[in-house]
Image (cartoon, rainbow, N blue to C red):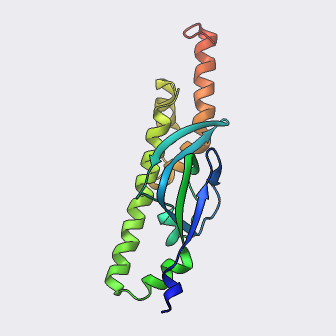
């Protein structure tokens, strides 16, 4: 291993600039050195914040071991400096580890993916979703396996919410 193998790219992320977009494969992780980054989802072109990350936090770590697309969007809340680690860099280091440690890391990544799904669900629940919408969602998704529910909820929740709100307006239960 040469001395340059330990040097990672440093990057500045400017305020308000999205640098990771949901739905895209992203084969790198970022270690925040300075600044503040937020993750968010888009619902009907509205940004719903999921979390914020400051110095010492890591973004995109799941991408180092997975070819899955990103679930969240990320942008700088304030000018931020990050260190970039690519999947190739990570895999090169992992290959030198004991196979048991590698297996543990894979399990940790699976749990992180589940945690991200829960964080997204919590962020959605903080928005203007009508309480009755969740009842309808539970009925609509009753036969969907739990591990697949999130993707269905993500796709239809805004539409079901709009329908419930419109029905309440028509019934005179809610003002438009």
Residue 17 percent location from the top left of the image: 65, 48
Q: Is residue 47 above or below residue 102?
A: above
In the image, 54: left or right of 28?
A: left
Q: Nearer the viewer, residue 41 or 1?
A: 1
Residue extending furthest toward the top: 172
Residue 76 percent location from the top left of the image: 57, 48
Residue at the (37%, 86%) spot, across then down:
97
Q: Is residue 142 visible?
A: no
In the image, 138: left or right of 111?
A: right
Residue 126 percent location from the top left of the image: 46, 32
Q: Is residue 104 above or below residue 21?
A: below
Residue extending furthest toward the bottom: 1
Q: Is residue 161 above or below residue 50?
A: above
Residue at the (61%, 12%) spot, across then down:
169
Q: Quadrant of the C terminus?
A: top right
Residue extending furthest toward the right: 45
Residue at the (46%, 59%) spot, across then down:
33
Q: Nearer the viewer, residue 148 or 99?
A: 99
Residue 50 percent location from the top left of the image: 48, 43
In the image, 166: left or right of 54?
A: right
């Amino acid at each position: 291993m040469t001395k340059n193998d330990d040097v990672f790219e440093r990057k500045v992320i400017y305020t308000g600039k999205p640098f990771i977009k949901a739905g895209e494969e992203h084969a790198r992780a970022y270690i925040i050195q300075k600044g503040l980054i937020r993750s968010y989802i888009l619902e009907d072109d509205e940004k719903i914040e999921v979390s914020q990350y400051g110095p010492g936090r890591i973004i995109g770590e799941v991408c180092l071991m997975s070819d899955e697309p990103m679930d969240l969007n990320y942008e700088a809340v304030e000018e931020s400096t990050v260190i970039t680690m690519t999947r190739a860099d990570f895999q090169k280091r992992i290959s030198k580890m004991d196979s048991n440690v590698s297996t543990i890391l894979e399990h940790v990544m699976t749990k992180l993916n589940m945690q991200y799904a829960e964080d997204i669900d919590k962020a959605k629940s903080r928005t203007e979703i009508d309480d009755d919408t969740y009842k309808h969602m539970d009925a609509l998704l009753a036969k969907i396996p739990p591990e697949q529910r999130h993707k269905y909820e993500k796709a239809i929740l805004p539409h079901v919410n709009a329908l419930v709100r419109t029905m309440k307006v028509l019934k005179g239960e809610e003002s438009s």
